[in-house]
Image (cartoon, grey):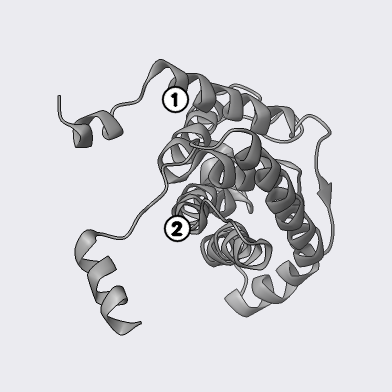
Amino acid sequence: MTARTRTRTLTVRDLAQIAIFAALIAALGLPGALTIGAVAVPITFQTLGVMLAGAVLGARKGFFAVALLLVLAAAGLPLLSGGRGGLVWFTTSPAAGYLYGWLLGVVVIGYLTGRLLPRYPFWAALGATVLGGIVVVYLVGVPVTALNLGLPVWVAAVDSVKFLPGDVLKAVVTVLVARQVHKAYPGLIPVRRRSARTSKVFAGRR
């Protein structure tokens, strides 16, 4: 087995981490959701779990953790915020697009976090988390909300602005927690290093 193959194979430890974070995201939904404004998109703590999955586990394991939760929820288990579950929340619900946005967002956060490690500077990490956990998720979620409610996209977009302060706060919490986790347990996300050719190019420019 080559080194490249080993990096693509999920170990027992990886599977345990995926299961733990899927359970964490589900647990963060226990307090339920707060719905504000005309568009019925709930504010939940589960988005914090999604951000943490990307920032702590990386793109691949984070994706599988979120996917595991969503598959189980689609099968009918009450794992979404407020004890919701079933296909209706993935089809006609105003929040359906945000669930799909989680899958793309966690990959973006995880990929960018791998680029920032091992230093993981705060502002760069916050930018990566905001990009994946807010911008990407909203780009998927807002149009689906507009479609399912029969609204213009701009109306759904304007209404979603009220969720931004809470989501930005979740991103800050994510970065602060992830920094401590990566200090205590380095290697959770493989560090992406420059190739030898790239290193020579940079060395020649010094």
Q: Secondary structure at mark 2?
A: helix
- The residue that label 1 is drawn on is 14
Q: Is residue 12 visible?
A: yes
Q: Amino acid at mark 2?
A: Arg
Residue 146 spot, x, y in % from top left: 59, 66
Residue 56 spot, x, y in % from top left: 57, 41
Residue lying farthest bottom?
205
Nearer-N-terminus badge (2/1): 1
Residue 81 spot, x, y in % from top left: 72, 36
Residue beneath the point at 60% across and 67% down: 124
| In front of the other: 166 or 146 | 166
Q: Is residue 41 visible?
A: no
- How far apart are labels 2 and 1 at the CA level? 20 Å
Category of crowding for the residue at label 1, using alpha-carbon neighbours closer than 10 angstroms: few (below 14), some (14–19), many (at least 20): some
Residue lying farthest left?
1
Circle nearer the viewer, 2 or 1 = 2
State if disc 1 and disc 2 touch (CB < 8 Å).
Answer: no
Q: Quadrant of the C terminus?
A: bottom left
- Asked if 78 appears above or below 37 in the picture, the reply is above
- Asked if 81 appears above or below 155 in the picture, the reply is above
User: Horizontally, is 127 left or right of 190 in the view?
Assistant: right
Q: Secondary structure at mark 1?
A: helix
Quarter-of-image position of residue 1: top left
Q: How many marks?
A: 2
- The residue that label 2 is drawn on is 115
Residue beneath the point at 78% across and 29% down: 30
Residue 89 spot, x, y in % from top left: 59, 40
Per the rendering, the mark at residue 71 is none
Residue beneath the point at 70% across and 56% down: 171
User: Horizontally, is 159 left or right of 134 in the view?
Assistant: right
| In front of the other: 204 or 117 | 204
